[in-house]
Image (cartoon, grey):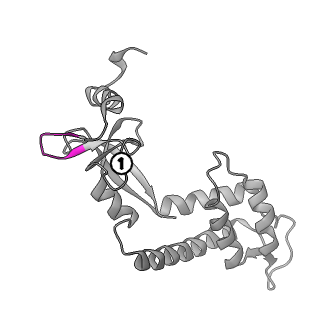
Amino acid sequence: MGDAAYSDSEKKAMDLRSECVYPFKTNELGMTYGTLDDAPNGQEPDLILARATNGRSGFISKKEWDEASAADAPAGELRTAQAELESAAAKMLKDEIDEDLQGAEISLEGAAGIIDAMHVGDAPEIDYDAIAEEAARHVEPLEDEPAQQDTALTAEIVEDGYLDVVEATTVYIPVYDVDGRTVIGEFPVTQI
């Protein structure tokens, strides 16, 4: 694909990917910019190279990223906030799954187990079948409703429910051009 297929900001971002090394370059506003890959420990740039949801390359503000991910919170507060968020996410997931199960419901413990399973490892492929099979141990028929044929917890139910919860708990921050002002897209910061 030729250069004509890329915008000026995308060309700049691609060029910057290969040029950004410590010490970082500085834009007109005095903000440093570069990649995390090239950053020495504790010396991250003000603007970090990222890809927006629209596919364009640009930079996210480290400050905005830290705020969205609560990375700048004290460790104790961060652990408490994360535990509260995961508890709320488990409740949301339980509600999502219960809507899809006919005549049955998953326990809060089962929904929390699904959330926990998604945090394990860096596997590019999530085994929703295995997660659904494990979580199915926490599905019980509703006492006040007649048994239904289709009360199985499927991989599709788990995946759809989890993706709905991720979307509901995702914060989007702006992706900027190298100037640090021009917004060219948005970047998702997942909270769970």
119 part of magenta stretch: no
Q: Which residues are magenta?
A: 25-32
Where's the N terminus, which quadrant?
Answer: top left
For residue 34, which quarter of the picture? top left
29 part of magenta stretch: yes
Q: Nearer the viewer, residue 110 or 139?
A: 110
Give the percent coordinates (x, y) of residue 109. 69, 78
Q: Label 1, secondary structure: give it.
A: loop
Tag 1: amino acid:
Pro
Please name the residue shown 42% across and 36% down the image. 55
Q: Residues within 10 Å of mark 1 (few under 14, many from 20)?
A: few
Please name the residue shown 73% across and 52% down the image. 127
Main SS type for the magenta part? loop
Q: Nearer the viewer, residue 149 or 32?
A: 32
**Residue 92, relative to residue 123: is it above or below?**
below
Give the percent coordinates (x, y) of residue 85. 50, 73
Give the percent coordinates (x, y) of residue 67. 33, 64
Determine which residue is flagged by label 1: 40
